[in-house]
Image (cartoon, helix red, strand yellow):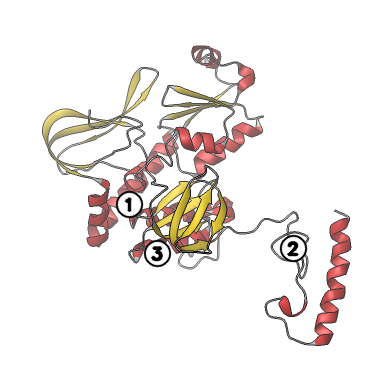
Amino acid sequence: MLYEPGDAVVPFFVVVAGELEVVRLWAGTETLIATYGPGKFTGEVNSLSGRPAILRLRVSQPGEAIELDRQQMQALLQTDAELGEILVRAFILRRVELVAAGMGDVVLVGSTHSTGTLRIKEFLMRNGHPYSYIDLERDPDVQKLLESFHVASGEIPVVICRGQLVLRNPTNQEIADCLGFNQTVDQTQMRDVVVVGAGPAGLAAAVYGASEGLDVLVLETNAPGGQAGSSSRIENYLGFPTGITGQELADRAFTQAEKFGAQLLMAKGKRLWCDRKPNIVEVDNGARIPARAVVIATGAAYRRPQPFLLETGVPGVFAVGDVRGGSVKRVASAVGEGSIAISFVHQVLQE
């Protein structure tokens, strides 16, 4: 075996002679996914991200192969544009096929009537992680499966990781920890820049920073793409005359950032210390990440679809007069803004 599901170190191989097989393991059985003969290469998007393997790779016919670690492979992608395009495109297409076929290391048992099931589906889908879904109401063998893992039907949704660890109605963070999303990320390493938020702005900062040689770490609580990632179709984005879904745009941007060496940490930023150098970003697991620079791209959340006129990014907090960016520095304007703000305050108090 060259690597197993869950292995943190996932080398990249080019087959010179012989043959390699990629197989999926579940319930003691193997499903053949792909075979690679001479001239073929292994890998999919986890080869870029450094996340643990989700499938088994083994030698099916003895031979010879060229082995590269993740750093060597990324150096190759960045120095040879033509070869890099071939590899990255293959990695993306292989992951798309795995997601479409539900061939991964995760099984979700749930119900279409469960909000928890829908939440977990969205989390796995938006993170591009392949999974199999078993419906409690429709699958005739589901009860036997639940009994084999000592799970009651009332405990759904249930996530089974690599056929071993069972999570009952887990949080998104628990799923991320189970699948090793953060396993290979050094949370004590000094970074050139920490980007807080992986929406379009955060991903753009990650791509540009990493492509220019910076050591970039991106913090995200849920999935790359932010609110734009859930858009069914973006019709007015430059370079896509037929439009592109928010998920596709997010996936491409995230893969591009990983190609240049940026890393993603699935965590929530809690506190920022910037009174001395280096800056320190504390995340919700208690880790304190040193960074020479920080880019905040968290977006905004409102209690209502749109903020009131003169309302800041904090609901119920207004800015009027000269403190407001772009103010015209006129007494009459300041007086008008003050009276307008109070009219909206009344509306806030009625909510």
For label 1, the residue is: 89
Earlier in the chain: of badge 3 and badge 1, it is 1
User: Is residue 194 placed above or below 212 in the rendered structure?
Assistant: above
Give me the disc on residue 307. Answer: 2
Q: Residue at x 64, y 58 (%)?
A: 300
User: Is residue 119 placed above or below 110 in the rendered structure?
Assistant: below
Residue furthest out toward the front: 276
CA–CA distance in space, label 1 to label 2:
41 Å
Three-letter amino acid code at the position of disc 3 = Gly
For label 3, the residue is: 209
CA–CA distance in space, label 2 to label 3:
32 Å
Earlier in the chain: of badge 2 and badge 3, it is 3
Position of 139 with respect to 165 (left or right) is right
Three-letter amino acid code at the position of disc 2 = Pro
* Secondary element at image label 3: helix
Three-letter amino acid code at the position of disc 1 = Arg
- Answer whether residue 58 is visible to the viewer in this image: yes
Q: Position of residue 219 (x, y in %)?
A: 49, 52
Front label number (2 vs 3) = 3
